[in-house]
Image (spheres, rainbow, N blue to C red):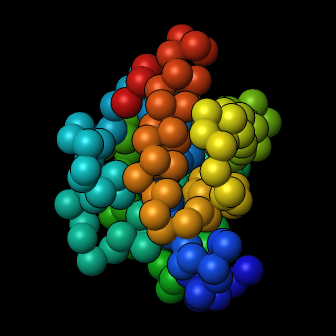
Amino acid sequence: LRPDDRLKSTIDGEAVAEVDVRAMNLTLLASYSGLMPKPMTRSFDDPYDCGMHDHRDQIKAYFMEAIGSGNPQKNQVGRQLKALGTTNDQLRVLNKVIRPAYPCLTALKKNHVDSEFFAFHEAEIMLRATEQIDLPMYILHDCMICKTSDAVQVADAIRKAFYGYVENLGWYPL
């Protein structure tokens, strides 16, 4: 389903909610590396907020490209940044701000610690969350589509599954 249509759906005639894990790949990268990004030092802060509020979409695209390639050295504008109109000069500014604020980027390794690596762990966490509760819901990458009345219980199950999973791997639980 397209994002605009998802929340128009129902389960058993009840409106649905989308319970999302904010910045799942970045959160997993920080947990894996044990290197806490400065914007993630408080629970409800925006993990992409590194002081460039007007450039959030570019910052998120930067991470999608870096994690996707397993390469923390963003020296050229990739497809996602290009689609946002990012220039090479803007990329240099992003590098100056992002690299020091997110030391966890240094843990990326092409073909080892990249988006495929984190997709596996994301799926394992979401599967464990569904196993904790017997409710109708659908996994969609880093979120669950569930009945609105079940959203708090689903969020709690995801949180518990995340913490239990990363602790079991010996990663740092954020």
Q: At 65% from the left edge and 43% from the top edge, which residue is drawn?
A: 134
Q: At 48% from the left edge and 78% from the top edge, which residue is drawn?
A: 87
Q: At 68% from the left edge and 57% from the top edge, which residue is drawn?
A: 136
Percent from the top left, x then y, of residue 13?
63, 80
Q: Nearer the viewer, residue 114 or 143?
A: 143
User: Eyeballing the image, is 59 above or below 4?
Assistant: above
Percent from the top left, x then y, of residue 53?
24, 70
Quarter containing the C terminus: top left
Say whether residue 112 is left or right of residue 72. Answer: right
Q: At 58% from the left edge and 57% from the top edge, which residue is drawn?
A: 143
Say whether residue 94 is left or right of residue 14. Answer: left
Percent from the top left, x then y, of residue 52?
25, 66
Q: Nearer the viewer, residue 78 or 117?
A: 117
When asked about the image quadrant of residue 93, the answer is bottom left
Can residue 122 be seen here? The reply is: no
User: Eyeballing the image, is 151 above or below 169?
Assistant: below
Say whether residue 96 is left or right of residue 78. Answer: left
User: Eyeballing the image, is 91 above or below 9?
Assistant: above
Can residue 139 be seen here? The reply is: yes
Q: How many marks?
A: 0
Percent from the top left, x then y, of residue 141?
68, 56
Quarter containing the N terminus: bottom right
